[in-house]
Amino acid sequence: MAAQEEDRDLIVNTDLTYPVCIGDDTRPAVLSFLQHRAQPYVVLCDANPNVVALARDIRGGKDCLGVLAFTLGESRKRLSTVERVHEALLAAGADRGTLIVGVGGGVASDLFGFAAATYMRGVPYVHVATTLVAMVDAAVGGKTGVDLRKGKNLCGLFADPVAVFANTGSLETLPYRLLREGLAEVLKTAIIEGDEFFDAIEALSPHPFWRWPWLEIVAQAIKVKTMIVADDRKEAGMRELLNLGHTFAHALETASNYRVSHGVGVALGLRAAGLLALRTGRFSEEAHLRVLATMALLGMPLRTRVRAGAAFAAMASDKKRRNGTLRFVLPVAIGDVEYGVTVPDRMVKSVLAQLTRSPEATG
Ligand code: GLY
């Protein structure tokens, strides 16, 4: 990964219809983008004080109708919060000519994106991502939505933003717990991509996070994601690759009533997908242990107390089911992943049970 010494803002040339700008401090780029659009806008942000401070900095000029902060979190990613956002937009004077700028992490991106796509039948949306999960996954690709009681992201739509800004400077104040959660999505992307990307994450894994070249890592993860999404915007095929580990993750999140966060779920899901791939003869033990060793060095959880039966029951509402059958994304090798795989239920149950036990020895 080449170091970006001078120009710390870079626009990833995606094949998507909108720009993705990555920078240590994207505030000037956001303001200049808003100035060019010359359109009234409302800033919606997570109520976290660091995020509110960033959101207030993009309140430039008379076009800004207001900065509205909401307490978020997975348990608030519900239709009731969307209704509150809509009421607040109305009170701020937003109409069909208003642009919505969302600032925050993954929940903010899913929820504010959905609120914008449904406000007065849809207004344009920009996201300024402040967490690693949002930068490398949630904010890019146009998936928006909220959870229902029975499961994650069961209510939503594909709605592309008009621009995405990944503010990597925000990672400096992000708790390590949340960095690790985002790293689960980065590792997922590196397993899909393989090659130099996985090697780079593996080589960085023993080093403290403050030494990581975050801008380059975020840029590489976004490049891989946008390449896949550009070919399959609405997940009719290969975009399913990006769900590696996610069938397990969503089940564990739902079964734990969201005490298991998305990033923790994805980490556990990567172990589970590796185990299922081993059992079905797809993945080598060596590759599986290589992934686990990297996860262990990154301090990712490898076991859970969520009951296997409850997690399996939660899979019944997984939206990746087709005709009642669960479909998994499984690694074949690092850099080679297969989607649409069906496996017997007993294997899934036994892998879920194994997640409550110690991880495989990594030597
Ligand atoms: N989070 C997976 C995707 O965007 O398709």
Image (spheres, helix red, strand yellow):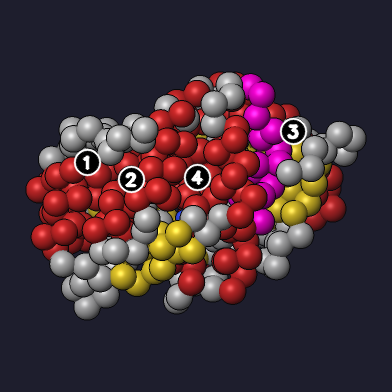
Task: Give the mark nearer the N terminus: 3 vs 4.
Answer: 3
- Position of 182 with respect to 327 (left or right) is right
User: Mark 3 or 1, which is nearer the eye?
Assistant: 1
Which numbered marker is on residue 355?
1
Could you tell which of marks 3 and 1 lies nearer the N-terminus? 3
Report the disc number at residue 24.
3
The answer, for residue 270, to whether it is visible in the render is no
Of the image marks 4 and 2, the number of the one nearer the N terminus: 4
Q: Which residues are magenta?
A: 210-223
Mark 3 to mark 1 CA distance (whole Å): 37 Å
Q: Is mark 1 within 8 Å of ligand 1?
A: no
Query: What residue is shown with label 2?
Result: 271
Picture layout, residue 274 above or below residue 299 = below
- Image side of residue 363 versus residue 131, left or right: left
| Label placed on residue 187 | 4
Q: At which x and y percent is residue 308?
A: 13, 45
Marks 4,2: beta carbons within 8 A = no
339 shown above or below 204: below
Q: Secondary structure at mark 2?
A: helix
Magenta region, main secondary structure: helix
Sequence-wise, the earlier of marks 3 and 2 is 3
The quadrant in which residue 58 appears is top right
Secondary structure found at label 3: loop
Quadrant location of the N terminus in the rendered image:
top right
Judged by depth in the image, the label closer to the viewer, 3 or 4, is: 4
Disc 1 and disc 4 in contact, CB within 8 angstroms = no
Nearest to viewer (mark 3 / mark 2)? 2
Q: Which amino acid lies under the numbered mark 3 shown in the image of this protein?
A: Asp
Please state which of residues 68 and 164 is positioned toward the viewer in this rendering: 164
Residue 213 is a magenta residue:
yes
The residue shown at (28%, 43%) is 253
**Dot placed on the residue nearer the N-terminal end, 1 or 4:** 4
